[in-house]
Each structure stands twice: as C-alpha cells, then as structure tokens.
Amino acid sequence: MINYNKIILASSNAAKLREMQDILAQKNITLVPQAEFGIPDAVEDGLSFVENAMIKARHASKLSGLPALADDSGLVVDALKGEPGIYSARYSGIEGNRETIDAANNALLLENLEQIPAKDRAARFQCCIALVRFPEDPMPLICQGSWEGSILLEEAGVNGFGYDPLFYVPEYDCASAELAPEQKNSLSHRGKALKQLLDYFKE
C-alpha cells in the first residue's frame, strides 16, 4: 500500500508549491519540495508537457525514495505558433531569481506580440501533472487541464506568478493576476488538473 500523505513535489517554484498545496490540503496530502531533500532540478529535455512532467517526477522519486508529483505547465499563444509552450518558464533565456525571470519572460512576450491586435491574441494555459509511486512506475497517473483566455496589451494585477499579469480571464473580465487565489484555483489549468488528481484519491 502506497502512503500518499507525503509526496515530493518535483519543483523549486515556491509559488507553485503554495498554489498546489492549497488545493491538495483538503485530502490531507502534504507536498514536500524537492529542495528539502537536496534534489536538484531535473534536465527537462522532453518535447511535450507530458514528457517533461514524467522526467521530473521520476527524477524526484528516484532521489527521495518517495512518491513524487510533477507539474509541467506553460502558456500556448496561437499567434506565436504555440510559443512559449514547454519553454514558458525559460522563454527569455535569462537567469536569476523567479521574479526577475518572470519579468523578462513577460517583457519578451509583449515584444513578440507587439504587432498583434487584441482580437488575435488567443492563448491558453496548459498543465500536465504526473504522479509516480516509485521511480520506474509503469502506470503513472497523468492529469491534464487547460485554461482558455488571451494576452493583454499590458500587465495588470499583483497576484499569482509567471504570465498571470498578462493572461486575460474572460469569466471575470480581468487579468489572472487580479483574481483571488480561490477564484484562480477554481478556473485554472492547474486547478483542473489537480481536481482530477483529487478524484483519483477519492477512488
């Protein structure tokens, strides 16, 4: 019997940890960041969100000896032929802290969409979550979620992280970064994928 009360989160993103823990707490599941085990980030050399989530989950499980959960998410912009996609977190190519990288990524996205009118800025957040019970788990659990919206002409809001200040949410007529955490969790790509995960634990 696998004990899921303690699961390694294959991420060093503190904001992502908080967001996921808020949702999973209702099932008394504790996510432990891989940094607490001294686990470095895996090399994400997959060609899809699913591949990268699996790479990260297996890597964290192997080095911790515990079940591991990995999220690979990104922004897909139609006018940019799917960019930034799986490279969303490292779109600008710069290094630094998360805030610095997020700011550079957002700036590059706006630059690349400079000639694209608002009506043609359709985009969506995609999320793939992989859960492995052990490193070589032949039947990993894969959960996916999508969040439709578009890209704003300028940043708005101070909540969330990543591309949230630029992602327009039609349901609330505002940026994702202007939503309260509980509002975002009810709509977001990650929230939808985690709901699938919670349904699995119910079973």
Image (spheres, grey):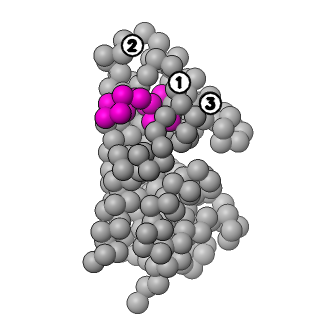
Dot label at residue 155: 1
As measured in the structure, the alpha-carbon distance from the residue carrying label 1 to the one carrying label 2 is: 16 Å
Q: Which residues are magenta?
A: 166-177
Residue highlighted by disc 3: 103
SS for callout 2: loop
**Relative vertical location of residue 170 with respect to residue 43 in this rendering, above or below:** above
As measured in the structure, the alpha-carbon distance from the residue carrying label 3 to the one carrying label 1 is: 10 Å
Query: Which image quarter is the C terminus in?
Result: bottom left
Badge 3 amino acid = Ala
Q: Single out the residue that lies furthest toward the bottom.
A: 1
Q: Nearer the viewer, residue 185 or 75?
A: 185
SS for callout 3: helix
Badge 2 amino acid = Ile
Q: Position of residue 39 (x, y in %)?
A: 66, 65
Dot label at residue 116: 2
Q: Position of residue 66 (x, y in %)?
A: 54, 78
Q: Residue at x 49, y 79 (%)?
A: 5
Crowding near the residue tagged with mark 1, few <14, some 14–19, many ≥20 C-alpha atoms within 10 Å:
some
Residue 110 can be seen in this image: yes
Badge 1 amino acid = Glu
Dot label at residue 185: none
Q: Residue at x 35, y 56 (%)?
A: 193
Q: Position of residue 25 (x, y in %)?
A: 48, 68
Q: Which badge, 1 or 2, is on the more N-terminal residue?
A: 2
Q: Is 138 positioned to the left or the right of 110 in the image?
A: left
